[in-house]
Amino acid sequence: MAGLTSTSNLETLSQISAELTYKFKPGFIKVFNEENDLWQWIPKSRARGEAVRVKFHIGRNTGTERQSETGTIGAAGHQTYHSGYEDFGIYTAAIEVSDLAVAKAAVAGHINYEAWADETARAAEDLARFINMDLWGQAADAANHCLGILDALDQDGTPDSYWGLSRTTYPFLKCIYVDHTSGGENQPLDLAALRNLYRMIRHGTGQDLVGTGEGAMTFKAEDQGGGRIDLIVTTPEIEQAYEALITANNRYPIPPAYNTRVDPGLTDLVYKRAPVVGSRFCPDYNLFALDLRTWRIEILPQVLVDRNGNQVETDFALVLQGRADQSVRAFWRIYFQLVCEKPWRNGRIYGISHDEPTL
């Protein structure tokens, strides 16, 4: 590697990149997952196009009916779809190792590039932190940018569009939103707010939502609901407030069988079988209830060529840039996009204080 120059052919760089990726990806993924919250929970999907396509189902067949044996099957109408397209976000984390460090490893008799291991781990931490901020955040400009959870799960219509589609025109793009503030102040979390959120995700709001403008459509009450809460994510402070809330309401784990060790604490926090977890990257005063069936992270695989000439597909790739001055440079790279196909099956409570109930 110390002998690489900027004139090295692409095939050689790809071969070494494949070898480096194979060697360091397991450690990179370990560090990355430990530092990244939302990435671990949302299902992954391998994309097959140069851009991500999301198909929103905005109209449905309505021909269901009960009839006699000699009856005539009624008209079904037709289903309607609307598609959104978005580029992949390209995320990179650069690494640079000096020629002296590489040469010293070779002289010591281990040409396995141990000098890269520490830099790889540090790059994983940096990339995880950067991706976390985008996944939890909101994009001011969605072009070539990963859409975050705040783009998908709006705050009462804000932001006003998702994947370029107006939430006013297409109200099915709105999530179940509950404002928990009163008199301009955030309110402590209570079980009534969670029950209300769960009911609306499961059964809908009970009202038709009418769109406006060209191509307007009505999101019928009967088209809503059907969601479930697979995961509740919030800040660590609100997670602790929830723990205090259920303890104050005498929600304790079932005692173990006789003659076994007793754990006096809450080993897991759940609400209606959904784990309740806190992330330091979650926007403050928020609680999100996610239906994970509606989410995915689309990853565009990268193709590298190993030393045997075989093409290898990988999600994270350590791509060698070559030699510059007295150092060898490379960077981790991933192409991905966050997708929510049914925002209305996910919920959000805003305005939750950090106050804990008195035990």
Image (cartoon, rainbow, N blue to C red):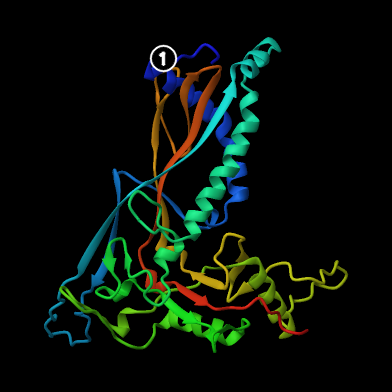
How packed is label 1: few (under 14 Cα within 10 Å), some, or many (20 or more)?
Answer: few
**Quarter of the image that includes the C terminus:** bottom right
Would residue 202 appear left or right of 328 to someone viewing this image? left
Question: Which residue is at the front of the view, 246 or 273?
Answer: 246
For badge 1, the amino acid type reads Ser
- Residue under label 1: 8
Q: Is residue 225 above or below residue 17?
A: below
Would residue 131 appear left or right of 10 to someone viewing this image? right
What residue is drawn where x is 46% and y is 68%?
291
Question: Which residue is at the front of the view, 41 or 256?
Answer: 41
Q: Is residue 286 above or below residue 192?
A: above
Q: Residue 224 occupies which quadrant of the picture?
A: bottom left
**Quarter of the image that includes the N terminus:** top right
Q: Is residue 37 above or below residue 111?
A: below
- Residue 242: x and y in percent read 66, 76
Does residue 348 appear in this view?
A: yes
Question: Which residue is at the front of the view, 134 or 190?
Answer: 134
- Residue 240: x and y in percent read 69, 72
